[in-house]
Amino acid sequence: METPRVHKKMSETDESSDSSVPREKNRGPSLGRRTAAATAGIALSRVSGIVRAQVVNAVFGAGPALDAFNVAMRFPTVLRDLFAEGALSAAFTKALVDARTHHGPAAEAALTRLVTLAFGLVTLAISIGCAFAARPIIALLSADAFVASEGGRLAVACFAVLIFYLPIAMLSAVAMALLGARGQTFRATIASLFFNVGSIAGALAGVPVAQALGHDPILGLAVGTLLGGVLQFLFQLVPLWREGVFRLPGFSDLRWKGRGFDDTYARHPVLEMARLMAPRVLGQGAISIALFVNTHFATAAGPGAITYITNAQNIILVPVGLFGVASALASLPLLSSAVAEKDAVSFRKLLQDASRSTLWLSTFSVTALVLLAVPLAKGLLEHGRVTPQDSLMNGLAIVAYGLSILFNGVSKVSVQGYYALGDTRQIVLNSVLYLAVNATLSAWLAPKFGILGLGLSNCASAAASLALHLALLPHTAKKEGLFSFTLLGEKKFFGEVSLHVGVAASAVVFSLFVLQPWFTAVTHEERWFTPWSALLLTAVGGGGLAVVWGACVWAWGPDDLKAVLQKVTRKVTRLFQRR
């Protein structure tokens, strides 16, 4: 009985001694499983976001009240993206990996309490200050005509409530990072479903309560949105509280030194995280200025414009979340572990696999959305106070912003490489470039083309930012001593990117110059084009495009997508065979 054991031990020793054979480290759930779980969670969350848009639009319509809410929500949304899907979450994930690798669970729990208290105090102070400055902030965001209207007054009132979503988003960011580091990406990503439930409750129940109390109905939606953020955090908190990872902090947690850790944490972790966050914060500042510019031109484009753009972005967020955010969330802990272990093979493979898969999925999303924009908008949103003309404008906004799905999706993956390498200075340069392109094109195109001009400027700036990300990431990796490689300089990868961009851009042009005029004529002349017939057209057209896309994946797609497609095909075949 001993011989097999000795033989097995010797085999393992011989195999491990062969340094020429690269082997994957055991890091728990694989990238594929983490990404699949994150994709499922985000799919449900983003679909609930569409339901929220349906309910809110049906209750308020594309009028001054909903315009005011959307303007008021824009600034908190920027701050939410900064913390929930940006600097804090990424920096905290890297700190968690380091804490667990070098010190174990005790350091991880102490770090969590420290970050929760420090950033909780900062975000609460920001919220209070912004609430007092609500009027000048709304005036800075909006066109003069909007500020002087009833919408301006409502926007100020909504902003004073919604800004307190910031500390709640900070808590959710900490919980999301903890769940992601444990491979619980499904719970981390599905949590925003509860945010949407709160918003829906605000529209259905909060509106009559606000009216009964003598307040503007739109304030009921604002309060419901805030309560939805609380529900989102509590859902994430449950398993972390049970494990003892997330506990209420005390002011003593700010005194980090003397806790018995070695030189890895001799420097205060909050200072180290702030160092990692600073470039992203500066970069987000540039993006915030670009958002202000876009909001100003959107409110100047007339009543309903800001609502049309918001509806389009809610729909576009579904594929961006499914294929960009999900891959980024799932890959960051694995990329960080690969860098910590100096595992160059795994780092490169993870980055390339995630980018290629996101590229293929994003191109399909762009093509399907822009070709079916009007029937999709009509079928989903034309209920209650939403009119057929609103559906045409919602569809135009989807087409205008659609191409950004591809650029933003791949960007969210590539940015994780910078965070994993601990060098995010490049993000500042990319964000400044984004601001320069976006502001310049918005000022030039928006007065002439309205919503279409704003969408095109958004897509062009996102494309420029992505190009810079992909071009300079290999240089950053080389400085960190991992390896030297190219992305855009690699002919095969550059050819793939160019082909996908060409296909998506062709779909946008065809939709603008052929489909949009036809749908406009059908809307005004044909009675058969109802929301139900539009949904049927969307389903049939989307199914046909999915079949074509699946065939292309089968022939030329990346291996991981082929594997998923083959698995789905086998299950469907077995299902029909049983029948």
Image (tube, grey):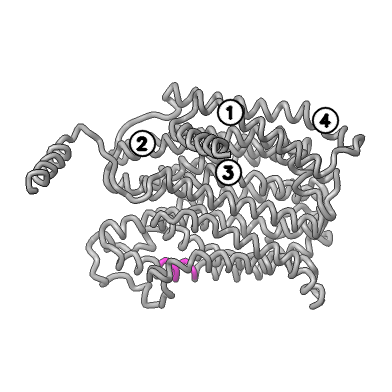
Density class for disc 4 (Cα within 10 Å; few <14, some 14-19, many ≥20) is: few
In the image, the segment drawn in magenta is: 115-120
Q: Of the numbered discs in the image, which one, if any, rests on residue 348?
A: 2
Q: CA distance from mark 2 to mark 1?
A: 23 Å
Amino acid type of disc 2? Arg
Can see residue 395?
no
Q: Looking at the picture, how far across and down is residue 106, in whole percent?
A: 30, 68
Q: Secondary structure at mark 2?
A: helix
Q: Secondary structure at mark 3?
A: helix
Q: Looking at the picture, how far across and down is residue 234, in whole percent?
A: 53, 68
Label 2–label 1 contact, CB within 8 A: no
Measuring 46% from the left and 63% from the top, which residue is drawn there? 175
User: Magenta part mainly helix, strand or loop?
Assistant: helix
Amino acid type of disc 3? Val
| Location of residue 256 (image quadrant) | bottom left
Q: Mark 2 or mark 1, which has the lower sequence index? A: 2
Relative to residue 340, is residue 271 drawn left or right?
right
Relative to residue 89, is residue 406 drawn left or right?
right
Q: Nearer the viewer, residue 339 or 300?
A: 339
Q: CA distance from mark 3 to mark 4?
A: 27 Å
Q: Label 4: which residue?
A: 517
Q: Secondary structure at mark 1?
A: helix
Q: Of the numbered discs in the image, which one, if any, rests on residue 501?
A: 1
Q: Label 3: which residue?
A: 320
Q: Mark 1 or mark 3, which has the lower sequence index? A: 3
